[in-house]
Structures are given as structure tokens and as C-alpha cells.
Image (cartoon, grey):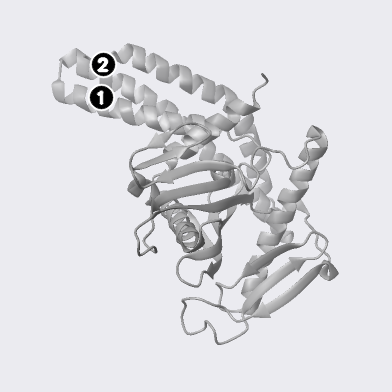
Amino acid sequence: MATDFPSEIRALRSTLESILKVSDLDQLRSEIAELSEQAVAPDLWDSPDKAQVVTSKLSHLQSELERLEKMSARVDDLEVLVELAQGEDDADTLAEAETELAATRTALGELEVRTLLSGEYDAREAVVTIRSEAGGVDAADFAEMLLRMYLRWAERHSYKTEVYDTSYAEEAGLKSATFRVDAPYAYGTLSVEQGTHRLVRISPFDNQGRRQTSFAGVEVLPVVAETDHIEIPENDIRVDVYRSSGPGGQSVNTTDSAVRLTHLPTGIVVTCQNEKSQLQNKVSAMRVLQAKLLEKARQDRQAELDGLKGDGGSSWGNQMRSYVLHPYQMVKDLRTEYESGNPSAVFDGAIDEFLESGIRWRKSQEQPA
């Protein structure tokens, strides 16, 4: 059946108009103009923290505007390409238009999802922690598989990552790992991954070849910004240093460079051992601790508003995805019902469709009944 290009382009334009309306281009341009003036002020760098906030926000907004303008131009160009192909009845150009239509539809869908990320911290970078849960060595192996999955996803998108801490299990895999993803909207995007993930497979660690179910938990936090003012008195923190463990280079296991921070009022514990120096590890651990305290403050505020202490739909024990490798092959999101029959691709970082469906699902849950 021939593609109904006019109908398809009308649908694209309708979606684009909705995105542009939500994005408010006039307001976006106004903010860019205001920040641009601040960025060229002679005294801007008198306060490096403020300068960093201004230049970072300006760069982000300029990228957003460019992305929206390029999408508008892309839809216009597609319409011209279709008119050219149909006017000349050129099969090759029509095939090119078909390909570009599909690509534009996908790109527009991704842009539409971005507009759904309007939470307080959604635009931030993310700090992700993965922990093995029930299932013994299989759970530890599963935690390592999830770590690789997220790092491969970031690599596919050319997002910078930094691993803060990896705690290795005795036989195989990880007890826990914490890493950072430096990309705009990394928190808003990855926050839908929070919860308990379940793996069902024939255990490679069971010499009888039995099927094993194991679990791993994922926690996602926004990176703390300079403007968040999360002050932590020194006497509220206990600092322990110890030798790093697990695979590593010459500096591992030779000095007490690993750092464990315990926030005494809340009992929150953070460790970091992947840097070479104790000072670097302490700085990284403080970043994670601040992120955890920021999230706790947000949850406490939300609990006051809801009167539902601790019930935000994203608790650590909330099972959200199942990965089945035996007796069939399937990965299924238990909230959105989205599924894939290719677990190998998913574990290699192909999780964009799961992220998109999760973001849309979360937005639908926010709508009044």
C-alpha cells in the first residue's frame, strides 16, 4: 500500500505544533537573550559558581532551541522532498522520502518525550546506584549485567559517564555500583528505571543447570547543583578510609584511598574507591551523599503534600521490569507492558524504547483521574 504522505505530514506537523507550544519558543528566546547578557558581563567570573550556573544554563537552552528549530526545518524539508518525488514520479526519491519519513517520525517522538520531562530536577545529570538483591551469586552477576547495560546505553548516545564506586561480590559480579551520567535530562530519563529488576535464566553458576530467579535494585538521583544549598556540617559525617578491593591497577590495594562517608543524622552511607587518591574519592563520595540528601528532602516535602509517607510509586522494592532468558526470550516492563524479544540487544544498551514508554506512562499517572 502506497504511503499517504499528506496525511503523515499533517500528523507530524500536529505533533510538532504541540511540542512547540509546550516548549514556548518566545519564552525560550527571551531567557537565552537574558542569559547571554549575563554571560558577557565583565564581573561574571568574580563568582565562579554563579558563572558556571549561567554558562551551563545558557548552553542547555541554546541546544534546546537549536533542536526545536532543526526539527521544524526537517519537517519542512520532508514536505519539499515528497512534492519533488511525486511531481517527477521518481521511485528512488519516493523511497528516500519513505526512509526520511520514518526517521523524522522517530526523532519527533523522542523530542515529544523530552517535553514530558518537566519535573523539578528532570533536566539534571544523574547518579545511578545498582545493588544486587535476592538470588546470591546470580543476583551479583545480574547487577553487573545491568551496570554494563546502562554504560552501553550512555556510550550509544555519546554521554560521558564516571563510575564512582564498584563493590565486587566474592564469586562473581557486583554487590553494588554507583556511577554518574553527564547529559542534559539524564535524571528525568533514567529515573523511570528506578525499582527492582528481575532476571530469570538457567544459572551459569549452578552445576545442575537449574533455572534461577534473581533480583537487582536500581536507584536514580539528580546531581546536586551549586544552587541547591545542601550544607552538611562536618560533625554530621563520619569518614572512614580503607584499602580499595577488586580488580584494578597498581594503586589498588596499596594505600588507604577508599572512602566511606556516614551521614549520622540519617544513617545514609556512601562509598567511593575508584579514584587513585583519598581526596578524589572523598570529593566524589560527597557529591553522591549530597544527591541522596537532596532526594530525601524532596521526598519529605512530597510526603507532607501527599500525606503518604514513602509511597511515591518509585520505592526501592517496586518491581518494574522482568528479563527472561529461559524458557523463552523476553524483556517486559511490568508497568507499561512494553516488551522486547531480544534480551541480548537490551543488555547491550538498547533501552530507549523502554525509557520512552516509561516516561509516557509516568506522565499518564500524573494526570487527574
Instruction: Decide which of 360, 9 is in the foreground and name it.
Output: 360
Check disc 1 and report its element: helix, strand or loop: helix
Query: CA gap, disc 2 to disc 1?
Result: 8 Å
Where does residue 351 sit, x and y in percent of width and height? 43, 43
At label 2, the amino acid type is Thr
Check disc 2 and report its element: helix, strand or loop: loop
When asked about the image quadrant of residue 182, the answer is bottom right
Where does residue 43 sit, x and y in percent of width and height? 73, 56
Per the image, the residue denoted by label 2 is 3
Q: Is residue 175 in sight in this rendering?
A: yes
Q: Label 2 crowding class (10 Å Cα cut-off): few <14, some 14-19, many 20+?
A: few
Question: Looking at the figure, which quarter contains the N terminus?
Answer: top left
Q: Residue at x 50, y 31 (%)?
A: 336
Position of 194 with respect to 331 (left or right) is right
Q: Residue at x 34, y 44 (%)?
A: 327
Per the image, the residue denoted by label 1 is 98
Where does residue 49 sit, x and y in percent of width and height? 71, 58
Contact between marks 2 and 1 (CB within 8 A): the answer is yes
When asked about the image quadrant of residue 239, the answer is bottom right
